[in-house]
Image (cartoon, grey):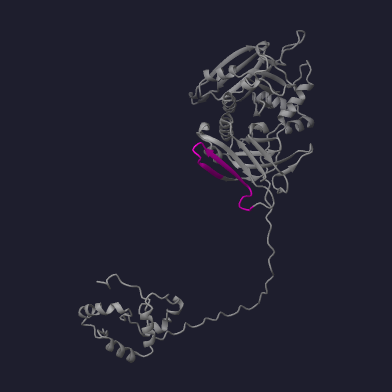
Amino acid sequence: MSFVAVIDSTKNKQIWSKAIHSLASISDHIKFVVSTEELTLSSVNSARTSHAEIRFKKRFFHEFSVDFTNIINEGYEEHEDGSNSYSFLINSKHLATLFRNLDANDLDYICFRIHWAHDSNSAMKYKLLIEIKTRKLIIKKYLAGYQPLFRKKVIIADIYKDQLQKNDDSIDENRINYIMIEQMVPKQFLDMIPSSTEDFKIEIKNDKILFSGYTKQVLKDREYLKQPMSLTITLNLDELLNSNLMMARDKDPLKKCINFRLKEFKNFMNLISTLNMSNSNNEIGEGYVNLNESEPNGDCFAIYFRNPGDPVLFELQNHSMDIHFIQITTDDTSNMMANSTNLTSKDLKKNSELQLQPYVIHKVEKQESPVRPTKSSSEPKPTIRQPIPKIKRSHTDKLVKRKAKYSTPEPLSQLIPSSAETESMVTYTRESNANTSSSSKRHKTSRSNDDNTDYSDTEEEYMALEDQMGDLEFGPTQLNNKPKSIFDDL
């Protein structure tokens, strides 16, 4: 066995089900990355403007076993830090259908298996095996095919955190802005705004932070195709759990404004709101936040952003899993054009690192079997057709076949005469079964006007008729294996 992961906790089953549906709402495919310490699931939308990544650590599973011995090359990578990983892509609709309306209390466990060794059965390679056992001892097994691919790790979160440690109090356009906020604040705000709201804005000015949900108007021929709408809440910067937005008194206050789509932010909030993580963090004091803490408070999440046009990162960390949602931000077209004209080659290289990359499939190498050379002749050989042997019928054969009533019929190829012989004589009047003598009288009276057909009532007349016919050929329905009629027993 190459990879085995088992989930048996009721809470973790619900988290897994919610995570699958959150990723499936972003893209039609989900990327799996298996390493020795964690299982990572991620998805990128077709426009490459939204990215979601969920890391399930080893402690999340009841059993987590990874063995890279004798692994196939497709999907396997060795990294510079000494770690190894196996990556593949699977259809999100299959997983969403499987884990839709999952009753975690009715399940005993969920098991995942992958056979990636060279000596594994070919029918099991490139397949994700899912086994679900219910409380009623019913085991359900599913098999989903996948495509191996290159990992292509998204490093936006690593870049933002590295730059955050290098930040100083100076106002720099490329500085990383950091916010730690409670989940309750944006959740209550999302509950107030209409469901038709499309965009979300974060604005910082005058030592305050503004969260706005709005919909732009669409006007055509002096008619509103879409009504404008906006709803905003304001918080002081000191009301946040932690941030680096507070400037010194002798410096001008920070001003920033970013916009992004509200749909994926709602998806992130719906996912983390279902995670009841406060029980695992009781030892952390209320309101205490440490950026270097490996297990921060589960009731809050972090926001990292830089400039309009750069990605915004939403992060939630827990002792058993990490959640990263990334979205590309926008601003007014005039400001974006003005900023793009001042970009240098170094800035363009940095921006390329902040772009969301598409999936790169690792094609499976097919081993072709050697083909033996064949001798080819210039002239085609003529095809010789053997004539079908004639079927001779004698009195002794008739008697033998009468005794062996249930004998195996002869091959059909020996029973079918040639077409020329069939045209010369065609008769379908012979009855070969012994039980047809009783019905011959009925046939004779019904067909008394037919002079070319002779019906025999006794054995002596039948034998005399065979001597007169001699060695004649018979049609396929005149032999002993003729299909029996349902009217013969009447």
Residue 394 showing in the rendered view: no
Q: Nearer the viewer, residue 344 or 284?
A: 284
How far across and how far down the image is residue 317, in percent? 67, 25
Q: Does 139 lie within the magenta span?
A: yes
Residues rendered magenta in the picture: 121-142
Q: Nearer the viewer, residue 214 or 134?
A: 134
In this rendering, the answer to whether 451 lies above or below 6 is below
The quarter of the picture where the C terminus appears is bottom left
Q: Nearer the viewer, residue 93 or 335?
A: 93
How far across and how far down the image is residue 229, in percent? 53, 19
Corner quadrant of residue 487: bottom left
Q: Does 85 lie within the magenta span?
A: no
How far across and how far down the image is residue 398, in percent? 36, 84
Q: Residue at x 21, y 82 (%)?
A: 448
Corner quadrant of residue 329: top right
Q: Nearer the viewer, residue 112 or 28?
A: 112
421 horizontally vs 170: left or right = left
In this rendering, the answer to whether 327 lies above or below 31 is above
Q: Residue furthest top?
A: 249
In this rendering, the answer to whether 402 lies above or below 152 is below
Q: How many numbered marks are there?
A: 0
In this rendering, the answer to whether 472 lies above or below 295 is below
How far across and how far down the image is residue 169, in percent? 78, 15
Residue 399 showing in the rendered view: yes
258 horizontally vs 194: left or right = right
